[in-house]
Amino acid sequence: MTRRKMLVGNWKMYKTIAETRSFAEVLGRNLGKLSAEMDFAVCPPFTALQVAKVVLPTQVAVGAQNMHQSKNGAFTGEVAAPMLQEIGVKYVVLGHSERRQMFAETDEAVRDKVEAAQEAGFIPILCVGENDAERNSGETMTVVARQTQIGLEKARPDGDAIVIAYEPVWAIGTGKTPSPKDAEKVIAAIREVVVVALGETEAAKTRILYGGSVKPANIAEFVAEKDIDGALVGGASLDPESFVAMAEAMGQVSGR
Ligand code: PGA
């Protein structure tokens, strides 16, 4: 089973509309460096989504960073699927650790968001990952398995309709990473949970990314691992040249 590799930039609360345009201009000059064998996306803040969809080259899809599970309602400050459908986003990042930690998103809310996103025709990027305390107490597998299992409870049994990102919380924005072998172990264990949730055939199709302090200098070692199908990148995805450098480094990993 060959799964297409993916590079996804999570811009978090960075970039205005003007900055999004500049990013797209530089990327546009480097299109030849983006392999046709891989999938690319960036996830700007809501305010820049529409312009991103217009100015980014078609090889680079657009994703939202969050979405509410209801189609509409009295939810001040939230954004619903129909609003994102109009813009033409392809992906929605769901259950990012910053959402879970700082905005109190529960496993159950993330599960309902996954269902709503798939119903709307988006591909959810379901984020899972243990924090420092959980890691130190040896709970990594338990936490990640629980987040994955609940996150997929209402998902369609279709491996192409979901992407999972393993992002250890302690590695996000810290410059620290697990070794690629350790990340591979956790990701292989996540795939076993996906087997139970979606079945063997669909789990073999499901892309599972690594995220947390990925940069041009280390991306290749992660994506060279058998079960790691790409990367979800925060800080290093903000600079278009660094985004392209990561795309190139991934493209050079043999056999891809
Ligand atoms: P980072 O963030 O690459 O800046 O560590 C990753 C993420 O939170 O998706």
Image: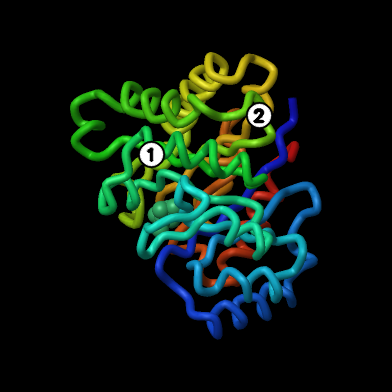
Q: Quadrant of the C terminus?
A: top right
Disc 2 residue type? Gly
Q: Mark 1 vs mark 2: give the one in front.
A: 1
Query: Which residue occupies 74% across, 69% down?
Result: 57
Query: Is residue 152 rendered to the left or right of residue 91?
Result: left
Name the residue nearer the viewer: 63 or 176: 63
Q: Quadrant of the N terminus?
A: top right
Name the residue nearer the viewer: 8 or 136: 8
Q: Is residue 49 above or below residue 182?
A: below
- Cα gap from disc 1 to disc 2, whole angstroms: 21 Å
Q: In this view of the protein, can residue 221 be seen by the observer?
A: no
Query: Which residue occupies 37% across, 64% down?
Result: 77
Toward the bottom, the furthest residue is 18
Q: Position of residue 10 (x, y in %)?
A: 49, 59
Q: Which residue is mark 2?
A: 159
Q: Is residue 69 above or below residue 135?
A: below
Disc 1 residue type? Ala
Q: In this view of the protein, can residue 218 be seen by the observer?
A: yes
Q: Which residue is mark 1?
A: 109
